[in-house]
Image: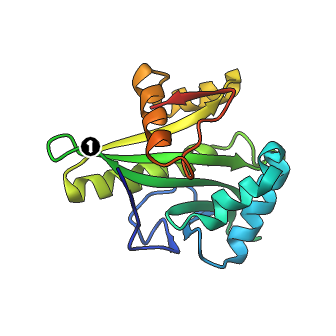
C-alpha cells in the first residue's frame, strides 16, 4: 500500500469538472499542509460537532498534519460561512492485476443549524470524493473504492448506506490491513462500523 497525493490542490469543484448541483455552495479541495483560513474555519466546526476527537490533538492532526490528507470544504458563496467538510486520504493497494484506489473518509461534518442540515451537503461532499477517486482510478487503471468507519448510530449508518457503502467483512478486513500497514496514520476506532 502507498498513499497518493493529488497534483491539483486548492481547486474548486467546477475546475475539477465535478457538479455540485448548488450554485449557492462552493466546494474546495484543500491539502492538509496548506495554511488556509477556510481549513481553520472547518476545523472550528469540527471542534463543535466532533468534540470526542479533540483529545490529544487528534482532530488537528487529521485535518492539518498528515501531508496525504485532504479536506473538501463546503461554504456558502454569499456569506463565506463554512457549512461542512470532509477529510480523506487516498491509498493505493493491491498488486498489478488487482490494483485498488481507496478513498478513506476520515471525517465528515455538516453544520447542524436549521437551513443547513438536511439539505444534501453531506451527499455533495461524498460525491466530490467519489468523483476524485473515480477520475484518479480511471487514469491509472485501478478499481475505485470509498471506505469509512461509520459511527454505530442508526442515522450515520443510514447516511452511508444512502451513499452506497455497506458494512461487510471485506471492509473490516481492509481497515485492519491498513492499520497493520501504517499504525501511525490508520486507526481502527472503537464503536464504529467499517463500510465499503
Expressed as whole percent of the image width and height from the top left, the position of residue 110 reads: 71, 48
In screen coordinates, is 72 left or right of 130? Answer: right
**Which one is in front, 193 or 124?**
193
Expressed as whole percent of the image width and height from the top left, the position of residue 168 reads: 45, 21
Q: How was the colour assigned to the protein in this rendering?
A: rainbow
Expressed as whole percent of the image width and height from the top left, the position of residue 122 reads: 62, 45
Image vertical order of residue 105 relative to residue 139, above or below: above
In screen coordinates, is 114 left or right of 106? Answer: right
Name the residue located 65 percent from the left edge and 66 percent from the top edge.
64
In this rendering, the count of numbered labels is 1
Name the residue located 63 percent from the left edge and 62 percent from the top edge.
73
**Which one is in front, 147 or 132?**
147
Q: Which residue is mark 1?
A: 94
**Extreme-left residue of the structure:** 97
Element class at badge 1: loop
Packing grade of label 1 (10 A; few <14, some 14-19, many >=20) is few
**Extreme-bottom residue of the structure:** 35
Name the residue located 42 percent from the left edge and 73 percent from the top edge.
8
Expressed as whole percent of the image width and height from the top left, the position of residue 172 reads: 48, 27
Task: Work out whether residue 58 can be spotted.
Answer: yes
Image vertical order of residue 3 relative to residue 64, above or below: above
Task: Work out whether residue 78 can be spotted.
Answer: no
Question: Quadrant where the C terminus lies?
Answer: top left
Image vertical order of residue 66 relative to residue 177, above or below: below
In screen coordinates, is 119 left or right of 180? Answer: right
Name the residue located 31 percent from the left edge and 56 percent from the top edge.
135
Image vertical order of residue 104 relative to residue 61, above or below: above
**Which one is in front, 177 or 121?**
177
Amino acid at each position: 500500500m502507498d498513499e497518493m497525493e493529488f497534483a491539483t490542490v486548492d481547486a474548486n469543484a467546477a475546475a475539477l469538472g465535478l457538479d455540485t448541483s448548488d450554485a449557492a455552495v462552493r466546494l474546495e479541495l484543500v491539502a492538509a499542509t496548506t495554511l488556509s483560513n477556510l481549513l481553520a474555519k472547518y476545523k472550528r466546526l469540527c471542534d463543535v460537532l466532533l468534540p470526542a476527537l479533540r483529545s490529544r490533538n487528534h482532530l488537528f492532526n487529521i485535518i492539518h498534519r498528515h501531508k496525504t490528507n485532504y479536506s473538501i470544504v463546503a461554504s456558502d458563496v454569499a456569506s463565506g460561512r463554512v457549512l461542512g467538510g470532509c477529510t480523506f486520504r487516498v491509498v493505493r493497494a493491491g498488486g498489478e492485476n488487482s490494483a485498488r484506489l481507496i478513498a478513506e473518509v476520515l471525517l465528515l461534518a455538516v453544520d447542524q443549524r436549521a437551513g443547513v442540515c438536511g439539505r444534501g451537503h453531506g451527499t455533495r461532499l461524498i460525491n466530490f470524493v467519489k468523483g476524485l477517486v473515480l477520475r484518479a482510478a480511471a487514469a491509472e487503471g485501478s478499481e475505485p473504492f470509498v471506505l469509512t468507519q461509520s459511527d454505530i448510530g442508526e442515522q450515520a449508518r443510514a447516511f452511508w448506506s444512502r451513499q452506497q457503502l455497506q458494512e461487510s467483512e471485506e471492509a473490516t478486513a481492509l481497515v485492519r490491513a491498513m492499520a497493520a500497514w501504517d499504525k501511525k496514520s490508520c486507526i481502527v476506532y472503537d464503536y464504529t462500523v467499517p463500510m465499503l
